[in-house]
Amino acid sequence: MLVFGQQIEDVVQLTWNDVNVTEELVTIRLGSIDIALTDPLDGPGRQLATRPGFDMTAAHPCSPWVFRGYSPGHHIHPATLRNRLSDIFSTRAARLGTLHEQAKLAPVAVIAEALGYSPATIERHAAASAATYARYVAAAREQRNSAS
């Protein structure tokens, strides 16, 4: 949520088919591509893989959910996760802020594909953050030309 601007409803639906943990690398698939998580972002994924929670009960012997819920075979409820996090930060504000920052880093289509958003959604965030990629490219060219 904080790193990739995902909605809680999507985060709780992550399965171990979406996350791959090896000794060398942790990857997560949010859109259509796998995103490598480097240190320190790989730590929570590694921790969940080794100690997923609720694994000592008969209710969750082989659960596919990354974030297991209280009920057997179900992921944690989005409202439960949102309430747990509300003491630390506003999940909505954090997600929107992340999307504003992500929209500054690459073309809209690339961000949208990587994060599983529609290009129109990421374009709105890019415009709201006053950092459309075209402006970024123009500013980079201008900076490069002034340095020459």
Image: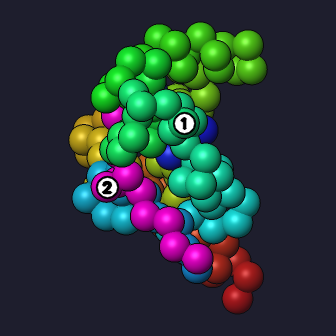
**Residue 59 in picture, x, y percent from top left:** 39, 28
Residue furthest bottom in the image: 148
Q: Looking at the picture, which amino acid does disc 2 mark?
A: Asn
| Earlier sequence position, callout 2 versus callout 1 | 2
- Which residue is under mark 2? 17
Residues in magenta?
Answer: 12-23
Q: Element under label 1?
A: loop
Q: Is residue 91 left or right of residue 27?
A: right
Numbered label attached to residue 28:
none
Is residue 110 visible in the rendered image? The answer is no
Is residue 145 visible in the rendered image? The answer is yes
User: Badge 1, how many Cα within 10 Å: few under 14, some, many 20+?
Assistant: few
Look at the magenta stretch and give its main secondary structure. loop
Residue 14: say if magenta.
Answer: yes
Q: Element under label 2?
A: loop
Count up the numbered dots: 2
**Residue 115 in picture, x, y percent from top left:** 37, 49
User: Badge 2, how many Cα within 10 Å: few under 14, some, many 20+?
Assistant: few
Residue at (36%, 45%) from the top-left corner? 62
Nearer the observer, 42 or 67: 67
Q: Quadrant of the C terminus?
A: bottom right
Residue 72: say if magenta.
Answer: no
Numbered label attached to residue 56:
1
> Does 14 sit above or below residue 12?
below
> What is the basis of the colouring in this image?
rainbow
Q: Looking at the picture, which amino acid does disc 1 mark?
A: Met
Q: Is residue 51 left or right of residue 119?
A: right
Residue at (43%, 64%) from the top-left corner? 20
